Image: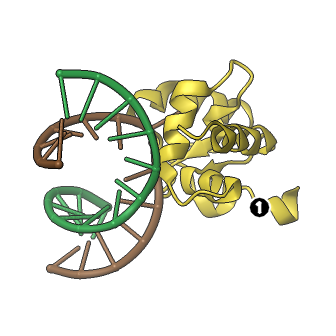
Chain colours: A yellow, B brown, C green
Amino acid sequence: MDMDLAHRMLDVVADIPPGRVATYGDVAAMAGSPSARLAGRVLSLLADPETPWHRVVKADGTFAPHLVDEQTRRLRSEGVEVRDGRITLHRWRWNADADG
DNA sequence: ATCCTGACTTGCT
DNA sequence: TAGCAAGCCAGGA
C-alpha cells in the first residue's frame, strides 16, 4: 500500500475541525487519490488513538455499520446533530476553504 | 490468475 | 427512498 498517500489521508483527517465532518471521498480527494475505499482502508488499518476518525462519514451522511454507536456518541459530543444514524451532510460537511 | 470481501461512490430503476 | 450494478484500491484464499 502507498504509505505516503496513507499518511496524507491521515493528515487530512487530523485537519478536520471538531464539530465538522468530511466524507471518505473528500479525504481521498484532498490527499490526492480517487479512491474513497482506500480512505476507509487507511483509517481501519492506520488510525491512531488521536485520529478523529469519527469525523469521516459516507457520502450520504450515514456511518459505517460497525461504527454507528461510537461515532454517533462522539459526533453528538461535538455538537453534531445525528438523526437516525445519519447527519445532514450539507450542514456539517467541512469546507476546507471556508472553515479552515 | 480468479474470486470474494471491505470504515466507499455514483448512476439507473 | 430503496435496491442493484459497476467502478474503485487492496488483500486473502
- Snapshot quadrant of residue A47: top right
Q: How many marks?
A: 1
Q: Say left or right for A99 vs A43.
A: right
Q: Is residue A62 visible?
A: no
How packed is label 1: few (under 14 Cα within 10 Å), some, or many (20 or more)? some
Q: Is residue A21 above or below residue A41?
A: below
Asked which secondary structure carries label 1, the reply is loop
For disc 1, the marked residue is A95
Question: Which residue is at 88% across, 55% downward?
Answer: A100
Residue B3 screen position, x and y as percent: 11, 44
Q: Say left or right for C6 vs A39.
A: left
Question: Which residue is at 53% across, 26% downward?
Answer: A45
Q: Is residue A20 above or below residue A25?
A: above
Question: Which residue is at 70% across, 57% downward?
Answer: A30
Q: Say left or right for A79 vs A46.
A: right
Q: Is residue A85 above or below residue A24?
A: above
Foreground: A26 or C11? C11
Q: Is residue A65 visible?
A: yes
Foreground: A14 or A21? A14
What's the residue type where badge 1 is placed? Answer: Asn
Foreground: A58 or A38? A38
Subunit under mark 1: A
Question: Which residue is at 50% across, 52% downward?
Answer: A36
Residue B2 screen position, x and y as percent: 12, 48
- Snapshot quadrant of residue A90: bottom right
Residue A73 screen position, x and y as percent: 60, 27
Residue A77 screen position, x and y as percent: 71, 29
